[in-house]
C-alpha cells in the first residue's frame, strides 16, 4: 500500500537520450501530465567517431523543463529524477566545465585500447566502454587527461549542473568495472592502466538523492530551489522498471537510436562466449538482468528517413509503405550494423548492409527490410539468452519505436513472442519516476511502485504462419554476417 505522506504529488523525470532529451511530469499513479522533447545533433568528425557538446544536453533540458512547468505549480513537484545514455565520456575540470566534446557510446575509435583493457581484466572489452575511451584520450590528448578533474557521464554532468555535486550511479559506473556488489572502484585495474581512481566521481546506489537544486538552476527552469535530485541510472535499466519487467523471464525491449534487450532472471547467467552479459540489479535482491545491446537499430531507420525519404515524410508514412510489403521483403536482407555492432557479434568493423537487391524491389521493400533486420538482431540476442538458460515468457516493448504497430507485429512474428506495449512507451522516464517515488517516500518498494504506476495498453500476438516464414530469412540474416565478417575486417579495420 502507498504511504500517506505530506509530499507534493508530482515527479519530474529527465532522460538524456542520444539524439534528444525528454522531460516528463508524472503523478503517483504513473499518469503522464505533460512531456517535452528537445532534439540535438550528433557530431561525426571521422568514420566511427561520434561526439556531442555536453552543453547541448544542458540547454535542451533547461528548455524542456521550462516547457513542462508552464502549467504546473513548482510547489507540487516532489523531486527531479535523472537517467540517460551510457557509456558516455565527459572529461571536466575542477569547475565541472567540459574539456572536450563528449565521446558517445556508439563511438568506435578505441578499438586498440579496448584490447589493452581486455589483457588487464581478462574480460572482453568493447570500445564503447569508458576505460578504452579514457586510454585513447590519455594517448592522444595528454593535456586533457592531465587537466581532467572527473570523468563524468551524461547524467553525471547534468547532476553536477543541477546540484553542484560530482556524482554517478552504480549502473553507469559498471561501464568502467565498478564493483556493484562491494561498492568499490576497480582500483587494481585503474592502477594497472595508470588512471587515477580519484578522477572518477563518487558512485551511489540508483535512487539516491545526491543533492538539491541550486538557486541558479531553479530560476532558469521554473522549479523551486532545494528540490531533491535523484540519480537514476542507464536508460535501459530504468526502462526495465518503467515497463514492470521485474520478474524472472519477462523481457524489456527498448528501441530508440539503439536497442537494448533486458531480461529479468532469478539467477546469474554467464555466457562462455561473452556474446551477452549479465548484471546484478542493485534495486531488487536476488534479481539479475541478462542483456544484449544493439547499436544502430532505430538509428538505421532514422538514417533512411533523413537521407532517402521524400519531403515532409515521417515515420508513420514509412510504416504505411512497409505494411504493403510481404514478410521477408522478397528476400532482401538488412544488417543493421551502421556503426559496427555490439551484442551478440561484438564487431566494431561490421557495416550496415543490404543484401539481395534486385529490380523488383521498391523503396517499400527497403523500409520493411530495415524493420526486419532490426527484429532479426533482437531475435539473435534473444536466442542466445535463452540458450544460456533464461526462458523468456513475454517481451515488453518501449521506446520511440513502440509507436509503430507494424514494427511491433514484425518483432512478434520474427521472435515468436507476444509483445506487450505499455501505455507509457517512454519507459525510461516512467522508470526514473518510479525509483524517485520510492526515494522520496511515496512508495516503500520498487515492485510496489511499479505495480501501481505501470499500465499495459496492448498485446501483439505472433502469427504462427508468418513466424515459420521468418525462420528462413533469419537464417539468411545470420549467414550473411558470417560470410561478410572477414570482408568487413579486411577493408574497414584501418578506416
Image (cartoon, rainbow, N blue to C red):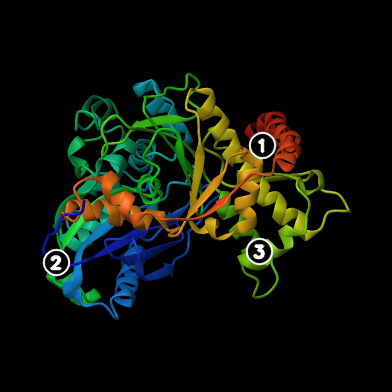
Q: Which residue is mark 1?
A: 491
Secondary structure beneath label 2 = loop
Q: CA distance from mark 1 to mark 2?
A: 51 Å
Q: Residue at x 23, y 28 (%)?
A: 191
Q: Residue at x 26, y 61 (%)?
A: 28
Secondary structure beneath label 3 = helix
From the viewer's side, name the closer residue of 349 and 123.
123
Q: Which residue is mark 3?
A: 307
From the viewer's side, name the closer residue of 405 and 348.
405
Say whether disc 3 or disc 1 marks the residue closer to the N-terminus: 3
Estimate how packed mark 2 is, as few (under 14), some (14 to 19) or many (20 or more) residues with alpha carbons within 10 Å. some
Q: CA distance from mark 3 to mark 1?
A: 25 Å
Where residue 98 sits in the image (x, y, percent)? 28, 57
Q: Which residue is mark 2?
A: 214
In this view, which residue lies farthest toward the bottom? 71
Are discs 3 and 1 less than 8 Å apart at CB? Answer: no
Label disc, if present, on residue 85 of the rendered structure? none
From the viewer's side, name the closer residue of 283 and 485.
283
The answer to whether residue 153 of the structure is visible from this angle is no
Q: Is residue 452 left or right of residue 19?
A: left
Say whether disc 1 or disc 2 marks the residue closer to the N-terminus: 2
Say whether disc 3 or disc 2 marks the residue closer to the N-terminus: 2
Amino acid at each position: 500500500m502507498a504511504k500517506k505522506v505530506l509530499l507534493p504529488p508530482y515527479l519530474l523525470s529527465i532522460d538524456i537520450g542520444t539524439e534528444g532529451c525528454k522531460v516528463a511530469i508524472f503523478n503517483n499513479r504513473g499518469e503522464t501530465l505533460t512531456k517535452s522533447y528537445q532534439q540535438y545533433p550528433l557530431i561525426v568528425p571521422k568514420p566511427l567517431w561520434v561526439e556531442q557538446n555536453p552543453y547541448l544536453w544542458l540547454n535542451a533540458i533547461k528548455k524542456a523543463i521550462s516547457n513542462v512547468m508552464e502549467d504546473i505549480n513548482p510547489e507540487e513537484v516532489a523531486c527531479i529524477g535523472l537517467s540517460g545514455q551510457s557509456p558516455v565520456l565527459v572529461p571536466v575540470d575542477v569547475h565541472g566545465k567540459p574539456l572536450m566534446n563528449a565521446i558517445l557510446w556508439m563511438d568506435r575509435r578505441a578499438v586498440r585500447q579496448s584490447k589493452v583493457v581486455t589483457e588487464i581484466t581478462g574480460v572482453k572489452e568493447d570500445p564503447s566502454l569508458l576505460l578504452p575511451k579514457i586510454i585513447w584520450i590519455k594517448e592522444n590528448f595528454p593535456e586533457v587527461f592531465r587537466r581532467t578533474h572527473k570523468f563524468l557521464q551524461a547524467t553525471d554532468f547534468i547532476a553536477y549542473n543541477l546540484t553542484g555535486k560530482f556524482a554517478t550511479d552504480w549502473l553507469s559506473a559498471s561501464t568502467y568495472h565498478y564493483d556493484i556488489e562491494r561498492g568499490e572502484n576497480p582500483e587494481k585495474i585503474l592502477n594497472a592502466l595508470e588512471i587515477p581512481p580519484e578522477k572518477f566521481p563518487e558512485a551511489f546506489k540508483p535512487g539516491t538523492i545526491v543533492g538539491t537544486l541550486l538557486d541558479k538552476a531553479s530560476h532558469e527552469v521554473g522549479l523551486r530551489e532545494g528540490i531533491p535530485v535523484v540519480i537514476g541510472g542507464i536508460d535501459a535499466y530504468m526502462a526495465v522498471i518503467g515497463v514492470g519487467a521485474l520478474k524472472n523471464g519477462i523481457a524489456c525491449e527498448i528501441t530508440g537510436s539503439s536497442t537494448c534487450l533486458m531480461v529479468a532472471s532469478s539467477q546469474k547467467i554467464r555466457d562462455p562466449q561473452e556474446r551477452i552479459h549479465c548484471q546484478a540489479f542493485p534495486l531488487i535482491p536476488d534479481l539479475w538482468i541478462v542483456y544484449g545491446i544493439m547499436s544502430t537499430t532505430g538509428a538505421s531507420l532514422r538514417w533512411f528517413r533523413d537521407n532517402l525519404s521524400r519531403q515532409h515524410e515521417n515515420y508513420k508514412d514509412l510504416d504505411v509503405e512497409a505494411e504493403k510489403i510481404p514478410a521477408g521483403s522478397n528476400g532482401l536482407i538488412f544488417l543493421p550494423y551502421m556503426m559496427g555492432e555490439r551484442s551478440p557479434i561484438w564487431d566494431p568493423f561490421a557495416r550496415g548492409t543490404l543484401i539481395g537487391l534486385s529490380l523488383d524491389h521498391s523503396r517499400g521493400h527497403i523500409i520493411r527490410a530495415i524493420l526486419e533486420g532490426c527484429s532479426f538482431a533482437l531475435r539473435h540476442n534473444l536466442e542466445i539468452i535463452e540458450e544460456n538458460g533464461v526462458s523468456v515468457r513475454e517481451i515488453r516493448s518501449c521506446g520511440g519505436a513502440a509507436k509503430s504497430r507494424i514494427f511491433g507485429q514484425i518483432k512478434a512474428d520474427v521472435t515468436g513472442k507476444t509483445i506487450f506495449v505499455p501505455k507509457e512507451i517512454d519507459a525510461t522516464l516512467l522508470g526514473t519516476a518510479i525509483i524517485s517515488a520510492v526515494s522520496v517516500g511515496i512508495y516503500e518498494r520498487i515492485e510496489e511502485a511499479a505495480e501501481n504506476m505501470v499500465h499495459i495498453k496492448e498485446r501483439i500476438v505472433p502469427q504462427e504462419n508468418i513466424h515459420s516464414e521468418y525462420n528462413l530469412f533469419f537464417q539468411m540474416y545470420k549467414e550473411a554476417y558470417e560470410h561478410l565478417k572477414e570482408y568487413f575486417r579486411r577493408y574497414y579495420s584501418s578506416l
